[in-house]
Amino acid sequence: GDSVTQMEGPVTLSEEAFLTINCTYTATGYPSLFWYVQYPGEGLQLLLKATKADDKGSNKGFEATYRKETTSFHLEKGSVQVSDSAVYFCALSPNQAGTALIFGKGTTLSVSS
Amino acid sequence: EAGVAQSPRYKIIEKRQSVAFWCNPISGHATLYWYQQILGQGPKLLIQFQNNGVVDDSQLPKDRFSAERLKGVDSTLKIQPAKLEDSAVYLCASSPPGEKLFFGSGTQLSVL
């Protein structure tokens, strides 16, 4: 069945460092891809999404490009801040409507000043 | 706008007891989801409602879990009897048709 695999954490970085969190997926058809973020004590929030191959999602300085040839959707940010410390989840939706999300296990990011 | 409301925030019970969680979605959102998030894992879909009808409950352990959506608005998820492995955060989410999901803060369940 469809699945998402994320790099294991925790990821520990200093402020202003470059961030990459790897995500690969297995799916039949043409899924939509998402990154969700969970800040301490808060609910999951959509960070960015891409609905077709070569689309780039971006928000708050984060970017991810839908790569069909490598079945990947890696999350990147050029300069992380302490406030980016959170758990990041890669997810896919097997259809284009963005429902019935399948999540990866999550990657914890800790940024120190 | 008001977000997805869930209660209680925390619940501690002993195994074999029953427990219920409540969710109030964002007004006007037709689709409602219950996810289970075990520590160290990503959320797993338990059940999806469209209005008050079930769209997908294939991963709901129906021998002990049940869920209903009252009049297509609020929803209740029940576990009876609880097992140790049910310890998790139970997340409710809602969405308008075909749009992104909005998540509540979850109910953290500990089964002792």
Image (cartoon, coloured by chain):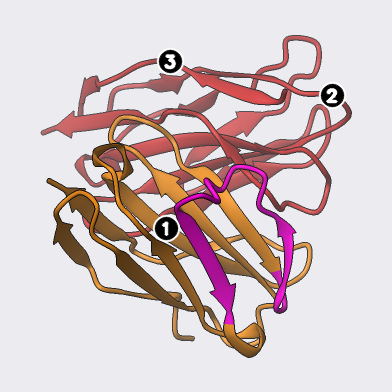
Chain colours: A red, B orange
Q: Which residues are magenta?
A: B50-69
Image x and y of residue A13, in percent:
22, 22
Image x and y of residue B96, in percent:
71, 73
Query: Residue at horizontal 16%, vertical 58%?
Result: B13
Mark 2 and mark 3 on one chain: yes
Image x and y of residue A72, in percent:
66, 18
Q: Which amino acid type is shown beneath numbered disc 1?
A: Leu
Q: Which residue is mark 2?
A: A28
User: Residue B68 magenta-drawn?
Assistant: yes
Q: Is residue A100 left or right of residue B41?
A: right
Tell me which numbered mark, 2 or 3, is placed earlier along the sequence: 3
- Cα distance, mark 3 to mark 1? 23 Å
Specify the farthest residue to the top.
A70
Mark 3 and mark 1 on one chain: no
- Cα distance, mark 2 to mark 1? 27 Å
Q: Nearer the viewer, residue A14 or B112?
A: B112
Q: Is residue B14 left or right of residue A86?
A: left
Image x and y of residue A59, in percent:
53, 48
Q: Is residue A66 left or right of residue A47?
A: right
Q: Secondary structure beneath disc 1? A: strand
Q: Nearer the viewer, residue A41 or B73?
A: B73
Q: Which residue is mark 3?
A: A7
Q: Which residue is mark 1?
A: B91
Contact, CB < 8 Å: mark 2 with mark 3?
no
Query: Residue at horizontal 55%, vertical 51%?
Result: B62
Question: Which chain does the residue under circle 1 lie in?
Answer: B
Q: Which numbered disc covers residue A97? A: none
Q: Which amino acid type is shown beneath numbered disc 2?
A: Thr
Q: Nearer the viewer, mark 3 or mark 1?
A: 1
